[in-house]
Amino acid sequence: MTESEAFSSEEIERYARHIVLPEIGGAGQQAMKRARVLVIGAGGLGSPVLSYLAAAGIGTLGIADDDGVSLSNLQRQIIHDTGSVGAAKTESAARAIARINPHVVCRRFHERLDGAMIGEILSGFDILVDGSDNFDTRYMAADAAEQGETPLVTGAVGRFDGSLTVLKPYANGAGGKANPRYRDLYPKRPPQGLVPSCAEAGIVGPVTGVIGTLMAMEVIKLVTGAGEPLIGRLLLYDGLSARFETIAYARRG
């Protein structure tokens, strides 16, 4: 263990409830301290992802978002508050993270990521979390993560429902078969305008909390090796019926 990885007495107390878990322990908490996670979107999904990963002790969090905080965001984007309206979401989120856990390093990318830059940025991180709200970014993130051999946790939400999965298409799963790609799950982008935005269709705030929190849990599992990540499985949540379902999917070819 290097000096930079050693826990202070304050950190030991902060993470005590993790350290006593056999599935995480001191080694898992050290892995979280070393981990570098890039989160696309500091909105509805990014808010709980960033909050819980910061509280859990992920050492470096990257925040990529080119938007500013608006009043209509606050019903679901809980990392921001009324005093942050008008500020860049990356700045507002970084301030909140500093309040949650001063041991976390934040790297801010106040820009809309494109195919030319995402690969370079992603090379400085171990895991990518996609909490974006549009299909162009989702496909771009999936392609960049596959090319960079970076695990991807991706989620989406609707009015009262949501879904998430984990992708490692560059690796083999059980039986030596290649893990599925994002396009094995979503082969084609839906036609423009077919899927309404949350501004058009509406969304109940806690749905983003449910899915975003589950996404943070998948990151912790990937970092620590605890449990079984949602690789090749799509988790579906229906908030109106309080029902979870898991659908298996596989590599198409």
Image: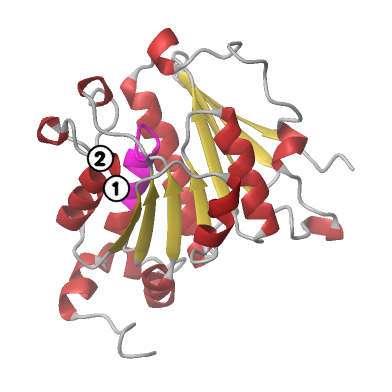
Secondary structure mainly formed by the magenta segment: helix
Q: Secondary structure at mark 2?
A: loop
Residue 10 in picture, x, y percent from top left: 16, 74
Query: Residues under labels 1 and 2: Cα distance?
Result: 17 Å
Residue 51 disc label: 1
Frontmost residue, 117 versus 200: 117
The amino acid on which the numbered mark 1 sits, given as a three-letter code, is Ser
**Image-based side of 105 in relation to 196, left or right:** left
**Image-based side of 77 in relation to 207, left or right:** left
Q: Is residue 64 above or below residue 20?
A: above
Question: Is residue 124 visible from the viewing direction of this image?
Answer: yes
Residue at (26%, 80%) from the top-left corner?
Answer: 7
Question: Is residue 230 visible from the viewing direction of this image?
Answer: no
Residue at (77%, 37%) from the top-left corner?
Answer: 184
Residue 59 in picture, x, y percent from top left: 34, 67
Residue that extends furthest to the bottom in the rendered view of this protein? 2
Residue 39 in picture, x, y percent from top left: 43, 49
Residue at (39%, 75%) from the top-left corner?
Answer: 30
Residue 88 disc label: 2
The N terminus - image quarter: bottom left
Q: Which residues are magenta?
A: 42-52
Residue at (71%, 30%) from the top-left corner?
Answer: 186
Residue 67 in picture, x, y percent from top left: 33, 34
Q: Is residue 33 magenta?
A: no
